[in-house]
Image (spheres, rainbow, N blue to C red):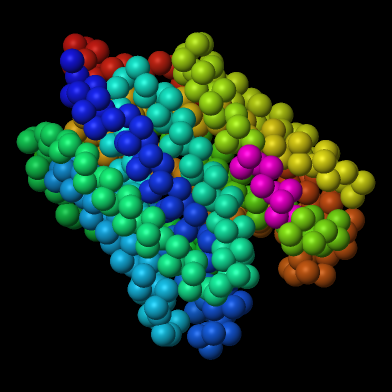
């Protein structure tokens, strides 16, 4: 019997899924839970707009820059040990955020919270691959998968409710009891064996990759406000140079941070590329739809928020169906169906206008975002289950990196496309007709992006070889 099966049965499938789901949801919610409270925080801490931006950016930077390295560190030094450290750090940082006396303290503690969040995101899927019996891996991955979009969607709603009833500090204090409970439950996990041959950490590769991702995230974020300014171009050059240096180093070290041979597997490489494209389109939609609903349609913030929740509800409801379909028909056809269905949803989104009813809009958004489950669920299960045990942390980290890159890129690129079609530098002055027209054209662009993702999937997504089959081939 496999180690994963033994571990899963010893610890209890339910406990493993509960803890990993709780930590994944918690870290996803905190990606944007603070956004809605920024005006309140600014008044309370006497902070300017730039400082408030860094409250959000410091968390995102930490998660994006470290998520791959953390996954590898878990492979080398033990996933359980690092995971427990991540829960502890996230919980402590949340407490410190809630007690911050200045905006600068809050920014620093948010960065620490981001480091903890990167650990929780990077290792949750890897630990699931080690501890959940193989016959239940798709079911388990489907539960974890739905936690991510649900957390991203719930962030503003939960934040707004807490701030309205209590104060902005409650947004952070909420994590403390949840983190303590998750930590105590995770202590019951058995130790996951560490493969001795990966005991050496590629420090140079880790530092170069971290610097590269920081340059990329900063560049994309600044481009939203500055366009192609000198600083944005320099950061872009830095990111490109960083990639070149990283590849050079990884090819010449005996213990690389990222085993480049993993990318010879067409399924692995294609799934990461498709994830970036899909999250670029879904995140871009989340960014631009509030302008359509509130400014063009004249709906209130609360009504708009409820309508935007339809996407997360769709993903949550369709995830069990996606898991069952993958078990019945296999991963490949379900992933292809998911990409095609999202493309169809995007095309329907391009038809919305000022006369589109609220129910109709919510149904289309339900389809577009909900069908993400049909790609995401079998994709995650396939990648993690086919990764070698000593590479599951890295594989999980790369999967999560593809999401965060998509989240960052979507907000900037799709937002820029939307602004360009609206023919304005200040969306607040755009007419309802201009916004509706821009929505139409922008979603024609996202449909083309998803068509490209579908093409990649049809060409490259094939059933991956198991580690045993790869060893036999070698």
- The majority secondary structure of the magenta stretch comes to helix
Looking at the figure, which quarter contains the N terminus? Answer: top left
Q: Residue at x 41, y 85 (%)?
A: 101
Q: Residue at x 32, y 25 (%)?
A: 385
State whether residue 168 is above or below residue 174: below
Res. 79 visible in picture: no
Q: Whole-percent x and y of residue 309?
A: 66, 47
Q: Whole-percent x and y of residue 407?
A: 52, 50
Q: Say which of 287 and 243 sits in front.
A: 287
Q: Residue at x 50, y 79 (%)?
A: 51
Residue at the left extreme, as displayed: 196
Q: Whole-percent x and y of residue 392?
A: 27, 34
Q: Residue at x 12, y 36 (%)?
A: 194
Q: On the rendered structure, is 23 left or right of 453?
A: left
Residue at the right extreme, as displayed: 355
Q: Which residues are magenta?
A: 304-313
Q: On the rendered structure, is 70 left or right of 216?
A: left
Q: On the rendered structure, is 193 left or right of 412?
A: left
For residue 207, what is the image quadrant?
A: bottom left
């Amino acid at each position: 019997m496999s180690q994963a099966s033994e571990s899963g049965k010893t610890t209890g499938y339910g406990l493993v899924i509960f803890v990993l789901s709780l930590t994944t949801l918690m870290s996803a919610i905190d990606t944007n839970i603070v956004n809605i409270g920024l005006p309140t925080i600014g008044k309370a801490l006497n902070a300017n707009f730039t400082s408030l931006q860094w409250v959000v950016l410091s968390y995102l930077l930490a998660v994006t820059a470290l998520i791959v390295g953390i996954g590898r560190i878990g492979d080398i030094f033990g996933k359980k040990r690092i995971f427990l450290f991540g829960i502890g750090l996230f919980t402590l940082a949340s407490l410190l955020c809630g007690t911050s006396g200045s905006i600068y303290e809050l920014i620093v503690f948010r960065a620490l919270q981001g480091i903890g969040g990167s650990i929780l995101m990077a290792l949750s899927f890897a630990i699931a691959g080690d501890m959940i019996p193989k016959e239940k891996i798709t079911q388990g991955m489907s539960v974890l998968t739905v936690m991510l979009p649900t957390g991203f969607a719930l962030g503003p709603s939960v934040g707004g409710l807490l701030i309205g009833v209590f104060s902005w500090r409650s947004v952070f204090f909420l994590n403390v009891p949840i983190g303590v409970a998750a930590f105590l439950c995770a202590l019951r996990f058995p130790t996951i064996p560490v493969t001795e041959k990966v005991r050496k950490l590629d420090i140079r590769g880790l530092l170069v990759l971290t610097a590269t991702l920081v340059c990329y995230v900063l560049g994309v974020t600044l481009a939203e406000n500055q366009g192609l300014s000198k600083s944005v171009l320099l950061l872009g050059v830095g990111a490109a140079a960083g990639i070149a240096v990283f590849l050079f180093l990884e090819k010449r070290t005996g213990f690389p941070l990222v085993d480049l041979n993993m990318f010879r597997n067409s399924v692995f490489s294609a799934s990461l590329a498709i994830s970036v494209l899909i999250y670029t389109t879904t995140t871009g939609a989340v960014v631009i739809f509030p302008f359509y609903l509130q400014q063009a349609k004249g709906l209130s913030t609360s009504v708009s928020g409820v309508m935007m929740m339809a996407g997360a509800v769709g993903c949550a409801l369709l995830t069990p169906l996606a898991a069952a379909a993958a078990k019945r028909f296999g991963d490949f056809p379900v992933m292809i169906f998911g990409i095609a269905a999202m493309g169809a949803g995007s095309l329907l989104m391009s038809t919305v206008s000022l006369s589109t009813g609220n129910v109709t809009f919510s149904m289309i958004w339900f389809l577009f975002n909900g069908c993400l489950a049909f790609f995401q669920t079998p994709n995650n299960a396939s990648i993690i289950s086919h990764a070698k045990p000593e590479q599951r942390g890295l594989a999980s980290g790369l999967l999560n990196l593809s999401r965060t890159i998509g989240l960052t890129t979507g907000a900037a690129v799709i937002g820029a496309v939307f602004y360009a079609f609206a023919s304005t530098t200040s969306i607040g002055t755009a007419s309802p007709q201009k916004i509706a027209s821009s929505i139409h054209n922008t979603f024609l662009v996202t449909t083309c992006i998803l068509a490209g993702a579908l093409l990649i999937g049809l060409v490259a997504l094939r059933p991956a070889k198991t580690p045993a089959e790869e060893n036999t081939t070698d």
